Image (cartoon, rainbow, N blue to C red):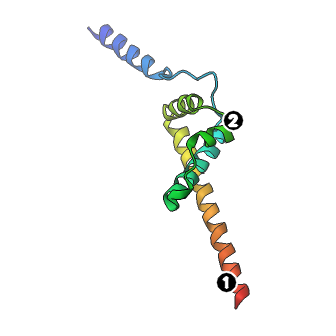
Amino acid sequence: MKQTFLILIFLILAGCAQDRISKPDALMSSEQMINFHVDLALLNASTNYAKDNFIPIDSLYAFHNIDSTTFAQSNVYYASKPKLYIKIFESVKAELENMQKQDTLQELEKLMRRE
């Protein structure tokens, strides 16, 4: 009974150690994923800001030289690795915050010059 229990525990642990999602052939690098998600956030923000200036997401795929399948497979792969996926989105957040600070600083500089 004890041996059966140990074998069962071993099989469960061995199963958990394997990658559940295989690495796709056309995997985007983590840097490419960061750049794509930053651009996607900017595209969504601009679409929400001015509904007249709608830009289709296909143009974003073309800009990054990928197709929707490549992005979807890469996104699923990185999502299966939570620590790496979190790092990607922390980098996206940091990049967007950096862009926001730069815009704010430029506006402040313009205001200071006027005074």
Vertical relation: 65 (above or below) 107 = above
Query: Which residue bears the numbered disc 2?
Result: 65
- Dividing the image into 4 quarters, which one contains the C terminus? bottom right
SS for callout 1: helix
Give residue 113's quadrant in the image. Answer: bottom right
Vertical relation: 3 (above or below) 83 = above
The location of residue 58, given as percent across then percent down, is 59, 39
**Type of the residue with mark 2:** Asn
User: Is residue 62 or residue 110 the one in the foreground?
Assistant: 62
Give residue 3's quadrant in the image. Answer: top left
Compared across the picture, whether 10 is left or right of 86 comes to left
Q: Residue at x 70, y 85 (%)?
A: 112
SS for callout 2: loop
- Dividing the image into 4 quarters, which one contains the N terminus? top left
Vertical relation: 20 (above or below) 37 = above
User: What's the distance in space between the residues labelled 2 and 1, CA to CA?
Assistant: 39 Å
Residue ranking furthest to the left: 1
Residue ranking furthest to the right: 113
Observer able to see residue 45: no
**Crowd band around label 1 with a 10 angstrom C-alpha radius: few (<14), some (14–19), many (20+):** few
Q: Residue at x 56, y 44 (%)?
A: 56
Query: Which residue bears the numbered disc 1?
Result: 111
The location of residue 25, given as percent across then percent down, is 63, 21
**Type of the residue with mark 1:** Leu
| Sequence-wise first label, 2 or 1 | 2
